[in-house]
Image (cartoon, coloured by chain):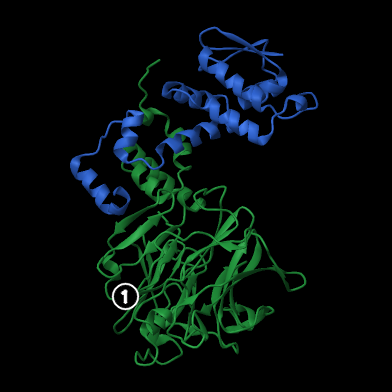
């Protein structure tokens, strides 16, 4: 059993088999520097809870876990529900998945954001993600002129 | 914790992880227009070769037709055809496409041949046709548009070590040149007809009715038998494509609506697929492409995974016209295009823009 403590003091107990899904934690365990409670200073409790929820669902099949293992299709469906999050949580989850080095979660989240970008105009993308347009009018004109077919 | 997130504030390496998941040329171009940090990120990714690592979604280049002077690029992901001005094509004929490049020949002397990148507009000049073994093009006999059937590079055309191979002389000859060469060199061969060429496992290979031949460019400058022929008969076109290291041969049959008149419309009644058993040098019939789609026409045959590009249907052949004579035999033009479903063994409802065209359509894999 491994215990993680978030930046705001919440603690989470995990089976080792789940903890190794977080590569950063796995490395600490292998290096022998995992103490009884591992602090995760960069990640808030609310976000860490979500990360752990994901890892528990995605834990690799062991003899024990197989009874609870989901089919690929079921897992995909669970993932699609999991990512229905507000933007702030999505953003924080990406940072957490990167810090804790959970490749499959990071892939899922990045693909989710890529899907939000697909098919949108630059204005729409800026609006969705609250990005400031920092091009000068001349720069913007040049950018659009270069590949005008893509801006129709 | 803020409720309004500015996604551009995410660390660069994380925005990059999102960016490399965009597989449509349009999406990538629009991404670059969002803000300066994203534009910079995309340039860095490009200079590190990240953009060339995974191919982008195939698109269809529609020629200008009748009243509309402009070309259009059709995007299957949103069903839209975007007008793309191509002044570079004035006075030129497009022979065929290779990935994101088009091979063009100028219609007046000295008839320069070029590789043209549709998106970046980069151009590579190849040696002039007058350096081909045949006499310079005599436009009374062979129209200049049919002078070069195909020309393909061994790697990216911008690569200084690139070698080019071309089918010319009414599809009867093969000639090659190295980047920066001024002349073409014709390979010695007995086979009188070639349908397609491919750079496969570090060699150029060519297919025709008499089999597949490997091109020995370095020492004897001739063709060597590589694999036996398959499917005899005149009215078919053969294409070569690599499929997970194996060599596939696709045979596209051609038929005429009125058997007795060349002036009648031609169409594709069926396809046959074969995979090479390289140990025994035997072709085995292939009945399915699984989760892949094939794109045929005046282009290097393209195979993609429909898991990666789900705007295309699995186990289907997307084809456009590949009978160039049709554009010259009939004033009306060509319209042999469609989608063949290998699993259902039937033609699907039409490709978008199925209509009469006065010049070829080209499958493009944009390169940014």
Give the residue at x 39% y 44%: B42
Judged left or right of residue B224, residue A119 is left
Instruction: Identify the hue of chain A.
Output: blue
Q: In which quarter of the image is the N terminus of chain B?
A: top left
Judged left or right of residue B364, residue A23 is right
Name the foreground residue: B242 vs B39. B242
User: Crowdedness of circle 1 by 10 Å Cα count: few (<14), some, many (20+)?
Assistant: many
Name the foreground residue: B340 vs B89. B340
Q: Position of residue B105 (x, y in %)?
A: 36, 77
| A39 shown above or below A76 | above
Quick one: SS at disc 1? strand
Q: Where is residue B266 in the image (x, y as percent from the top left)?
A: 48, 77
Residue B347, quarter of the rendered image: bottom right
Give the residue at x 41% y 64%: B354
> Would you name the residue on which mark 1 appears?
B92
Q: Residue furthest top?
A: A9
| A138 shown above or below A61 | below
């Amino acid at each position: 059993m491994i215990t993680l403590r978030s930046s705001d003091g919440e603690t989470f107990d995990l089976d080792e088999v789940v903890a190794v899904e977080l590569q950063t934690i796995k490395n600490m365990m292998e290096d022998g520097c995992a103490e009884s409670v591992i602090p995760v200073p960069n990640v808030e409790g609310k976000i860490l809870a979500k990360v752990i929820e994901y890892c528990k669902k995605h834990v690799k099949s062991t003899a024990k876990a197989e009874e609870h293992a989901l089919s690929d299709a079921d897992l995909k469906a669970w993932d699609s529900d999991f990512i229905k999050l507000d933007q702030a949580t999505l953003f924080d989850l990406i940072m957490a998945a990167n810090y804790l080095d959970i490749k499959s979660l990071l892939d899922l989240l990045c693909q989710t954001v890529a899907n939000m970008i697909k098919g949108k105009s630059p204005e729409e993308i800026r609006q969705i993600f609250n990005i400031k347009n920092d091009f000068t009018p001349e720069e913007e004109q040049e950018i659009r002129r270069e590949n005008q077919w893509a801006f129709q | 914790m803020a409720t309004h997130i500015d996604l551009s504030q995410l660390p660069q390496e994380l925005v990059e992880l999102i960016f490399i998941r965009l597989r449509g040329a349009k999406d990538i171009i629009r991404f670059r227009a969002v803000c300066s940090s994203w534009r910079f990120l995309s340039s860095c990714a490009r200079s590190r070769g990240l953009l060339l690592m995974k191919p982008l979604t195939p698109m269809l280049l529609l020629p200008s037709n009748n009243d509309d002077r402009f070309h259009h690029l059709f995007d299957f992901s949103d069903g839209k055809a975007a007008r793309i001005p191509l002044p570079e094509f004035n006075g030129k004929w497009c022979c065929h496409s290779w990935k994101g490049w088009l091979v063009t020949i100028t219609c007046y002397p000295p008839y320069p041949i070029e590789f043209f990148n549709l998106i970046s507009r980069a151009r590579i000049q190849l040696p002039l046709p007058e350096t081909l073994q045949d006499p310079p093009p005599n436009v009374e006999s062979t129209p200049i548009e049919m002078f070069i059937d195909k020309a393909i590079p061994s790697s990216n055309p911008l690569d200084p070590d690139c070698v080019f191979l071309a089918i010319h002389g009414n599809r009867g000859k093969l000639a090659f040149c190295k980047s920066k060469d001024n002349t073409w060199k014709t390979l010695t061969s007995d086979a009188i007809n070639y349908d397609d060429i491919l750079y496969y496992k570090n060699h150029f290979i060519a297919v025709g009715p008499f089999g597949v031949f490997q091109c020995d460019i370095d020492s004897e400058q001739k063709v060597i038998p590589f694999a036996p022929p398959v499917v005899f008969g005149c009215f078919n076109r053969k294409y070569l494509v690599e499929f997970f290291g194996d060599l596939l041969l696709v045979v596209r049959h051609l038929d005429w609506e009125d058997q007795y008149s060349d002036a009648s419309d031609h169409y594709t009644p069926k396809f046959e697929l074969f995979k090479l058993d390289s140990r025994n040098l035997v072709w085995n019939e292939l009945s399915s492409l699984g989760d892949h789609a094939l794109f045929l026409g005046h282009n290097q045959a393209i195979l993609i995974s429909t898991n990666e590009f789900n705007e295309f249907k699995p186990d289907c052949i997307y084809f456009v016209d590949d009978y160039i004579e049709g554009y010259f035999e009939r004033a009306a033009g060509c319209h042999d295009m469609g989608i063949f479903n290998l699993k259902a063994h039937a033609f699907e409802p039409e490709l978008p823009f199925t209509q009469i065209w006065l010049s070829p359509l080209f499958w493009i894999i944009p390169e940014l």
